[in-house]
């Protein structure tokens, strides 16, 4: 420590002692109540400091980032708090969030997402069928003009529109097989093209 740092430290100790002595003398009649309040405020401030210091970890746990593109052709998708992997792709230039589903054969759009990308779900022929965990549903085959993920664009991609209730669109193997490797490690899914 330099002599300037020692002087600064001595000054801070002296100043803290003076403020502490003044606080004790001026509040000696209600010292118990004042100390309780001081401890409470100290804990609140300590909690705020901890929250600021851990904010990146808290944010990653509550709402993980969509994907980390560590290098060209490699996409890392963090697992969400519910255990699912989600990925946002531009379908016909419109961002749509999908659940990555290796158990689904095709890209399956919900009726709401189909409307967003330019389809009219009420006027489509639902002659396909799919067996899901909730039973059989009717599907309408469509072609997506473009599917873009971080600069990787595929054109004329087959997909299906779900005729039943579907909360979120599914990104199935028809799209995932375009990647050379799919790896699940830790809390991440890694797609390599």
Image: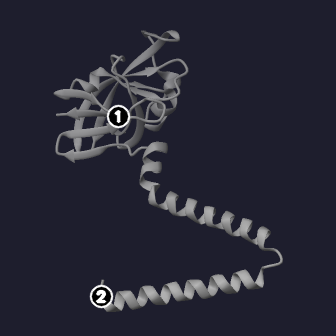
Q: Which part of the image, by quadrant, shows the C terminus?
A: top left
In this rendering, would 98 be left or right of 149? right
Residue 80 location, quadrant: top left
The kind of secondary structure element at disc 1 is loop
* Residue 57 x/y as whole percent: 42, 50
At horizontal 62% and vertical 66% (from top left) the residue drawn is 42
Task: Determine which residue is flagged by label 2.
Answer: 2
Q: Residue furthest right?
A: 29
State the residue in front, 133 or 24. 24
* Residue 159 x/y as whole percent: 35, 23
Residue 72 location, quadrant: top left
Question: Which disc number belongs to residue 187?
Answer: 1
The kind of secondary structure element at disc 2 is loop
* Residue 93 x/y as whole percent: 35, 43
State the residue in front, 72 or 81. 81
In this rendering, would 44 be left or right of 133? right
Against 52, is 131 above or below? above
């Amino acid at each position: 420590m330099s002599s300037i740092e020692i002087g600064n430290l001595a000054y801070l100790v002296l100043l803290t002692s003076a403020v502490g002595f003044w606080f004790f003398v001026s509040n000696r009649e209600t010292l118990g109540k004042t100390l309780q309040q001081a401890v409470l405020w100290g804990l609140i401030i300590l909690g705020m400091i901890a929250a600021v210091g851990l904010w990146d970890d808290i944010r990653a746990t509550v709402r993980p980032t969509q994907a980390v593109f560590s290098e060209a052709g490699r996409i890392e998708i963090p697992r969400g708090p519910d255990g699912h992997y989600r990925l946002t792709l531009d379908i016909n230039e419109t961002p749509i969030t999908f659940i990555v589903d290796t158990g689904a054969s095709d890209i399956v759009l919900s009726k709401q997402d189909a409307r967003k990308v330019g389809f009219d779900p009420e006027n489509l022929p639902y002659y396909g069928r799919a067996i899901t965990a909730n039973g059989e549903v009717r599907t309408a085959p469509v072609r997506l003009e473009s599917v873009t993920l971080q600069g990787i664009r595929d054109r004329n991609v087959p997909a299906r529109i779900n005729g039943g209730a579907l909360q979120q669109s599914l990104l199935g193997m028809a799209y995932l097989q375009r990647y050379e490797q799919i790896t699940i490690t830790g809390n991440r899914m890694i797609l390599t093209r």
